[in-house]
Image (cartoon, rainbow, N blue to C red):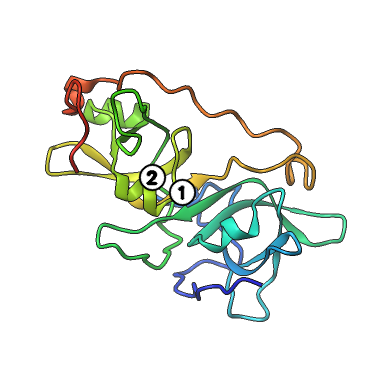
Amino acid sequence: VLGVTDTSAIFGGAEGSSATASVPGALPPHLKLGFIRQCFPDKGFSYLAWKPTDPNSENIYVHCSVADPVTLNGCLAVAYKPHVNSRGQTQASAPVWLLKGKNEAGERPPVDIQKCWGAYKGIIEGTTKGWDIKDCWVRCPTVEMEHGQVPVIPSTVMVDSELNVGDEIQFDIFINAKGQPQVRGPLWKKHAHWKPGKGDGKGGAEAAAPAASVPSNPPAAAASGRPAGGRFRF
């Protein structure tokens, strides 16, 4: 059994609920918010709970085909679609979303359910051909339309949130000192590495989508302030 950090700093909401869709930053209505209660790598499953330290808070079963216990153990929170399995247990369906990373102060803040869901969604892109893999950006048409640039994602956020090129993320931004939209942590990462089998739409009947193709050159280099043949400097 893996030890779990107490994540009891939650604000408002009924047990196991998501905030309403009309609230900016709220989870979509089909998703519920859970926190890690226990992870059992040797047994191949984990338990989420709305209040992990409350023994009366319902256990949400997560099979390893949906998310590996070791992976879950490092998350701030999990957003999942629930279903009831054959044993009558509430179970998380695949794919789940994992809240990971730190804020600009290098801290892992408490999760506020009223505004924890990022305003933007996109796919991380980058290339190793002439660019360091840590120098990445997010393909997000909404940010590009609003700011005329692709949002950059610095190496610190990539490392803290355990991100890779091709990952789908739900995120917020701020404007950095260079006038660029920049991804802010913590952020939600769609957990794509689940296995078909347990749960079926419920847990995993379809294979994970392949990673997005990576362009050989970064998009809108001039508009984004990205040098034509070098690397970002964050």
Q: Residue furthest right?
A: 86
Mark 1: secondary structure? strand
Residue 86 in the image, given as x and y percentages of width and height: 87, 55
Seen in the picture, residue 52 relative to 66 is either above or below; the reply is: below
Residue at image location 31% in from the left, 18% down from the top = 217
Whether residue 151 can be seen here = yes
Which residue is denoted by mark 2 in the rendering? 171
Task: Judge the density around disc 1: few (<14), some (14-19), many (≥20) Cα neighbours within 10 Å.
Answer: many
Q: Position of residue 66 (x, y in %)?
A: 68, 49
- At 49% from the left edge and 46% from the top edge, which residue is drawn? 189
Image check: 72 left or right of 87?
left
Q: Which mark is residue 188?
A: 1
Task: Quarter of the image for the N terminus: give it.
Answer: bottom right
Identify the residue shown where x is 34% and y is 52%: 185
User: Badge 2 local density, few (<14 within 10 Å), some, or many (20+)?
Assistant: many
Q: Is residue 9 left or right of residue 107?
A: right
* Residue 33 visible, this angle: no
Task: Looking at the picture, tell me which residue is in the foreground, 86 or 16.
Answer: 86
Front-most of residues 234 and 205: 234
Q: Earlier in the sequence, mark 1 or mark 2?
A: 2
Left or right: where 157 falls relative to 2? left
The amino acid sitting under disc 1 is Trp
Q: Looking at the picture, how far across and down is residue 170, in whole percent?
A: 43, 43
What is the spatial separation of the Cα atoms under label 1 and label 2, in whole angstroms?
6 Å
Q: Are marks 1 and 2 in contact (CB under 8 Å)?
A: yes
The amino acid type, in three-letter code, at marker 2 is Phe
